[in-house]
Amino acid sequence: MQAQTSLSVQWHDVCSVDDLVTNSGVCALIAGIQVAIFSVQLDGETNVYAISNWDPIGEANVLYRGIVGTLTDKIVVASPLYKEHYDLDTGKCLEREDASVSTYPVRVDKDRVFVEL
């Protein structure tokens, strides 16, 4: 008989919306994982994204320090190390098919930011 493993995925109250800097990133340690959280304002609308803070090319936890922008109609963060662009929706690297980062669902409720891990 094969043992079943159940992963406990839950929402984590990470910070206040006021703790985020528009068009910039912050880093949070959630359940032992470094997560880069970005508040992006585009066309008058603000969205919050969460991705792994680990840069797979530079092999360092630095993505929250990257520059946020758009590239080929995608909202991206440019790694501060080697400047690869990671799509904040999918985590895919735009320059390299063999690189990507994890993305995490985010919700804002009563001015609190929650990330699902």
Image: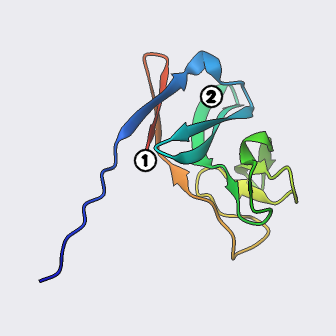
Is 11 left, or right, of 105 in this rendering?
left
Q: Secondary structure at mark 1?
A: loop
Crowd around label 1: few <14 · some 14–19 · many ≥20 (10 Å): some
Residue 55 bears which disc, if any? Answer: none
Is 30 left, or right, of 7 in this rendering?
right
The residue beneath circle 1 is: 117
View extreme (left): residue: 1
Residue 44 vs 1, above or below: the answer is above
Q: Residue 68: where, in percent of width, then height?
A: 78, 41
Is 107 left, or right, of 26 in this rendering?
left
Residue appearing at x 11%, y 83% in the figure: 1
Displayed quadrant of residue 13: top left
The residue beneath circle 2 is: 46
Mark toward the start of the polypeptide (1 vs 2) = 2
Q: Residue 106: where, in percent of width, then height?
A: 48, 38
Displayed quadrant of residue 100: bottom right
> Which amino acid is tagged 1?
Leu
Q: Residue 59: where, in percent of width, then height?
A: 75, 62
Asked whether the residues under the numbered discs 1 and 2 touch, taking CB atoms below 8 Å apart as contact, a structural biologist would say no
Residue appearing at x 55%, y 53% in the figure: 103
Crowd around label 2: few <14 · some 14–19 · many ≥20 (10 Å): few
> Which amino acid is tagged 2?
Thr
Residue appearing at x 57%, y 43% in the figure: 50
View extreme (front): residue: 32
Q: Along the line of sight, which residue is nearer the eye, 81 or 94?
A: 81
Q: Secondary structure at mark 2?
A: strand
Q: Nearer the viewer, mark 1 or mark 2?
A: 1
Residue 20 vs 18, above or below: the answer is below
Residue 15 vs 91, above or below: the answer is above
Q: Residue 44: where, in percent of width, then height?
A: 68, 25
View extreme (bottom): residue: 1
